[in-house]
Image (cartoon, grey):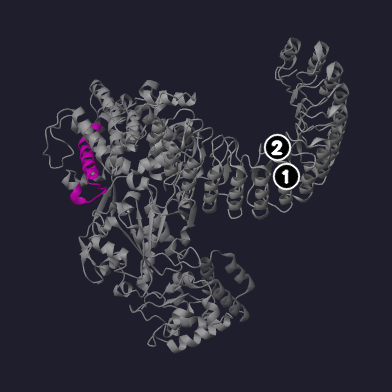
Amino acid sequence: MAVFFRLFDPNFSYQLLTKLPARALGWHHLKEGVGRALSRAQLTPAAFRTRENSPLLPVPCHPSGTCPGLVQDPSVLLSCPTGTWINWYHTWLGRSISGQFLEEIISHLHRLELLRAEEAALVWAASPLPEQVRALEAVLAGKGIHTSQSLQSFMESSNWQLYLPSLPSPMVQKHLESLQRCCGNGLEAGALQRLTNLLLVEGLTDTQQQEHDILQVEITKGLPNASRSIPLEKLFLPLSKVSIPPRVSVTIGVAGIGKSTLVKLFVRTWAKGEIGRDIPLVLPLTFRELNTHEKLSAEHLICLAFPHITKPGCISAGAARTLLILDGLDEFKTPLDFSNAVVCTDPKKEIQVDSLITNIIRGNLLQEAAVWVTSRPAAARQIPGGLVDRMTEIRGFGAVEMKDFLDQMFLDNRDLSSQVLQHIRANRSLHVLCTIPGFCRICGSSIAYYLKNSTDQSQEATVVPRTLSEIYSYYFKMALSGDWLEKPREALRMEQAVNSSKKLVGSLGRLAFYGLLRRRHVFYEQDVKGHGIELALLHCSLSTRLLLKEDTQTSTAYYFPHLTVQEFLAALFYYTAAKRAIFDLFAESGVSWPKLGFLSHFRSAVHRALQAEDRHLDIFIRFLSGLLAPQVSKLLAGWLPAKDEAGGFRGPAISVLQGCLSAEHAVSSRAVNAMHCLSEIQHTDIAEAVEEAMRSESLAGMLTPSNCSALAYLLQVSDVCLEETNLSNCLSYSVCKSLLPQLLFCHTLRLDNNQFKDDVMELLGSVLSVKDCQIQRLSLAENQISNKGAKALARSLLVNRSLMLLSSPGPAVEASTHSFTPVSHSLQHNSIKEDGAAFLAEALLTNHRLVSLHLQKNAIGAQGARKIAEALKQNCSLRELSGNSVGDGGSTALAEALRVNHSLQSLDLQSNSISSAGVTALTAALCSNRGLLSLNLRENSISKEGGPAIARALRSNSTLRKLDLAANLLCDDGGKAIALAIEENQALTSLHLQWNFIQAKAATALAQALQSNSTLVSQLQENAIGDEGMASLSAALKVNTTLVDLHLQVASVGAAGAQALAEALMVNQSLQILDLRGNAIGVVGAKAMAGALRVNRSLRHLSLQENSLGMDGAICIATALKGNHGNRIGQSGAKMIADTIRTNSPDCVVDV
């Protein structure tokens, strides 16, 4: 039975200890010690049972090889010669001593005057805890025998030794040192920070299970669909107080993302005692090592990972909690078959390695061991989801990390690093793929090689690498040039390199091709020899760039630097071999129906790629197509057929690929890959035509099956779709259905005005329900969606994890507290009524991702508003809401919700037939609400009786920032009440009062408020405030220093008002925009404004259209501009002003 304890911590599991059998060693002393420890911690057993079960640590093996569970006599360990036991076990001390116990040790030594205050300060200055322990060891090392004996006595007399585990033997210490040595190699400091946080995922998505790694990155645009991360140090800890540590963990990541680097980082950091202090023993293994064994027992497996152990039965019996790491499942030669694996529970019995792994994962063997498997996503599906307790994913580079990585690659040449990064960012497809560190290294090296060697060559002779084929052609040339990297342009040497390396590259290509067919990516000496490669040649510079070597305990493993390098060499081999091959190269036996000519073999390869279920030949086909491109032929001159011969293949190959575009009703990823192949072969006519139509929003009528494939391809690679995918007014039901698999990954999708009916909503609902879905912004405005369609969408919201806003197309209020960017899904201007609103309300009870729901120009009515209001009392994620036809009844229900809901930030009730009764209920709720930031009540029927209610809310509410009351019936009395409240309210920043029949009295009150309110921006246009109101506002402008915009069009302002305003402009230095259109300031007002313009230096835009200025007024304004060159004041139709502007102030624009 395994015995677990919390090291140096009295808060260990009392329940577990009470279940120990009586024969457990030292039980009498343990029980007594437990009582004392609990007493010191002021805990009772009952109180302790309610505490969170923290991670418990197993007792490691005793130096003798036995597993006693408890130290029978700790003094044996502590009575060694001075410092011996510390030196011997210092790593485990650093891993084991808790902060509390360290504090007691230091206090004890300080009381005995054996540790000075400054020495204690040095210890506490170190960080983290293991470093503090090491600092204490260093201080005590020179203190002599007396200090050591005092420390021993303290540890013996304390209760800590009663549950102090056996410290590790020298063989464990050797294991730790060995791990630090082997796992410290190849770790680059700049690349490690990304690996310290992993993404928590809920199983594999369909894309991860079915698509090639490169396609996964292209489809998802390098952005994983996960919202929660977990630090590396907590990878094997419980996620909550009620959960337990995971037994089987799986970490996935595409090829080249850094899975093996992650394992090395974890093991090295653990061996140093910096993380994983609850794990006493880590046993790392790779599937590359396991490939060399046919049969193994569980104990033999332990010996492989822990060569220093003498009795592996101690671990296999579960006496110590162990972490078994199995790195690289995708490299295992035998697929795991959990359905037919033979059950084995005997740790000494040798069985097939694949059966051994399945039994360990199932828990039949090494039951107490935690298992951590790393794998590429497609291979990870071999492990049934029910056996996986925790799945994590390694994220790719962010923008900053990519830059740092390239800077690290080119430490001696930062200018080159900047040029490489600039080139990568200019090509969206490459930029997305460069989120993979392995690909980024190859891409960066190739572009740097091009940049270094293109300066001395003519532009015609060099090709800026843009496609995958061009990138890898440069990488191949760089490998070919070997030691002469600085002199690749010497034709004689290049020719020599070609002639001497063709045989080796051909053999490597054969190895790569047939390995790809067998899904083999790691090779051993027998594989290498079997493909005619001499081992001696594998040490040449060319081979070491294309095929890497790793020595294991029993053999040597060979592998390509990245999966794509294997695929490129495989394509190069197939291309050259297809010219002379008589039989199908895919038939490994060599027996097949005759196939003559390259094009026959090309068709066969394309057909094979289309038939492959796991898509493992897709990138191979891209490279094979790319080798037909004229520019690639130039780059690989000497390796490919002559130019004319390759050009003869290109046209028919294009026809073969185009035939793949319309083969299916739905645009599959196979059709998209065919578009990638056409791009590699440099035939981009279809894609360019569709992209231009997207730019000009003229896609309607041209979405044929081929163009739909091009559109799906552009959704991944085009800059037009970078910020928003706008497919408005161009899709039919059938086209939308064909594009569904590709629409999954559009983060921002606009489908407005497509005349979609409820049947399309059923389709979109199915898309939103898929785990892969990454749609965050979705707009469906101006379609023909009714209650049935709303029900389909609402049903999808019950399970959707990505969609976060249902809003009108336009600027969305971002929820700053949420980790996602809010998305925009518009249902405005449809036919959704009360029942549809009820379905959406039901979804809001479950969906906690949606941030905005906008339903303008529908007819949800008061009943629909009541349903949504009830949902708002429980929903705490929605930030924006708008409705239609809610009336006073609906607004009253929403007001009740606002008393409870403090997460809603924006409520849009424009044009909802709300009167003063409704606004009274809403404003009463605002008195207690502390979450709403924006309230839109424009175009309702709020009369002057509503003004005092709004004023009361503004006096007590300190969170509302924007209030839109335009186009109501407030009149002077209502406006004045609101204006008086503004004097006290310092939170409101935007107030719209236009079209409210406000006159001078309210304008005067508002002007007085502006003298004390330094935050408000107000709009009063279309109100008859007259010269009196203008004079009051002008007086406020002389004092106010924050107002930037002032809109007073059609405000009945005459010459007197303009004169007052001009006086204010001579003083005010903050106003930048002044709109006086549709007034009657006349020549007198123009002259006054002209005088102000000579002095004012802040105004940037002045609108004076329809003001009866006349020629004299225009001349005055124009003359004023001669002395003021900092104003930009609208565009004029008056010739004199235009001429004056051109002559004296060409940067200024005037509207008159």
Q: Secondary structure at mark 2?
A: loop
Please tell me how crowded label 2 is: few (under 14), some (14-19), or many (20+) other residues with Cα within 10 Å. Answer: many
Percent x, y of residue 190: 47, 49
**Would residue 939 appear left or right of 447 to someone viewing this image?**
right
Work out whether residue 73 or residue 282 is closer to the camera in this orientation and state it: 282
Give the overall secondary structure of the magenta segment. helix
Please tell me how crowded label 1 is: few (under 14), some (14-19), or many (20+) other residues with Cα within 10 Å. Answer: many
Q: Which residues are magenta?
A: 498-527
Q: Quadrant of the C terminus?
A: top right
CB atoms at circles 1 and 2 under 8 Å apart? yes
Q: Secondary structure at mark 1?
A: helix
Q: Quadrant of the N terminus?
A: bottom left
**Amino acid carrying mark 1 in the image:** Val
| Residue bearing the label numbered 2 | 940
- Does residue 542 appear in this view? yes
| Residue bearing the label numbered 1 | 919
Q: How many marks?
A: 2
Residue 18, above or below 273: below
